């Protein structure tokens, strides 16, 4: 049984709130975007955010979750579809909002990782953080591919 400090519990509760917000945003935006590529991407990210939330709930219940192959395989899968050319401003706005959200959530995982005593929990949080960064990278790549994110 995992024995969490009060600070660790507070950090996990914060991360849970962040994951719940991500789930809401991805779900809401996937129902509103016009580009089918984004619809699929947001659905996939939302499903992974739900896995993150489930993992955090397991930790809070005193369990050390196993980082199973299902999570690892899903995080390595890439969308095969290509963005369409008829992107609209609303789709772009949703992407920027989610990119900003992913940057924030990734940074809060960074803080949490350094505050945990248990190295297994640190590894799990690091795995989640990497998936958050992957989400951001995929959104960034979409924005770049449709000419909405200019790289100097």
Image (cartoon, rainbow, N blue to C red):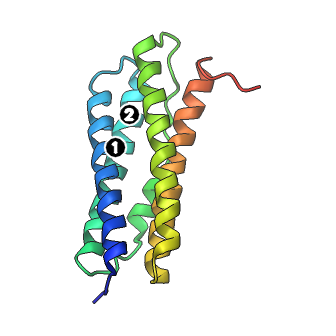
Above or below residue 33? Residue 137 is: below
The tag on residue 40 is: 2
Name the residue tied to disc 1. Answer: 22
In percent of the image, x 53 and y 26: which residue is there? Answer: 82
Any part of residue 55 in sight: no
> Residue reaching furthest bottom?
1
Badge 2: residue crowd in 10 Å (few <14, some 14–19, many ≥20): some
Towards the viewer: 83 or 24: 24
Any part of residue 35 in sight: yes
Measure how far apart labels 2 and 1 are at the Cα level. Answer: 15 Å
Across and down, in percent, residue 33 comes to 35, 21
Tell me if label 2 and label 1 are in contact, CB under 8 Å.
no
Towards the viewer: 75 or 5: 5
In percent of the image, x 60 and y 32: which residue is there? Answer: 141
Which of the two labelled residues, at mark 2 and mark 1, occupies the earlier sequence position? Answer: 1
Above or below residue 135? Residue 90 is: above
Across and down, in percent, residue 2 comes to 31, 86
Q: Quadrant of the C terminus?
A: top right
Above or below residue 132? Residue 35 is: above
In percent of the image, x 44 and y 21: which residue is there? Answer: 93
Above or below residue 121? Residue 81 is: above
* Secondary structure found at label 2: helix
Residue 63 occupies quadrant: bottom left
């Amino acid at each position: 049984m995992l024995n969490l400090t009060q600070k660790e519990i507070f950090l996990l509760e914060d991360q849970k709130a962040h994951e719940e917000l991500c789930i809401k945003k991805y779900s809401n935006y996937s129902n509103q975007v016009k580009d089918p590529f984004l619809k699929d991407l947001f659905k996939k990210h939302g499903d992974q955010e739900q896995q993150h939330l489930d993992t955090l709930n397991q930790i809070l219940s005193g369990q050390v979750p196993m980082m199973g192959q299902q999570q690892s395989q899903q995080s390595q899968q890439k969308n095969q579809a290509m963005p369409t050319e008829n992107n609209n401003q609303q789709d772009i706005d949703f992407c920027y909002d989610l990119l900003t959200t992913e940057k924030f959530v990734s940074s809060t995982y960074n803080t949490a990782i350094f505050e945990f005593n248990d190295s297994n929990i640190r590894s799990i949080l690091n795995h989640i953080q990497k998936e958050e960064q992957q989400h951001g990278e995929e959104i960034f790549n979409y924005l770049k591919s449709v000419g909405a994110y200019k790289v100097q």
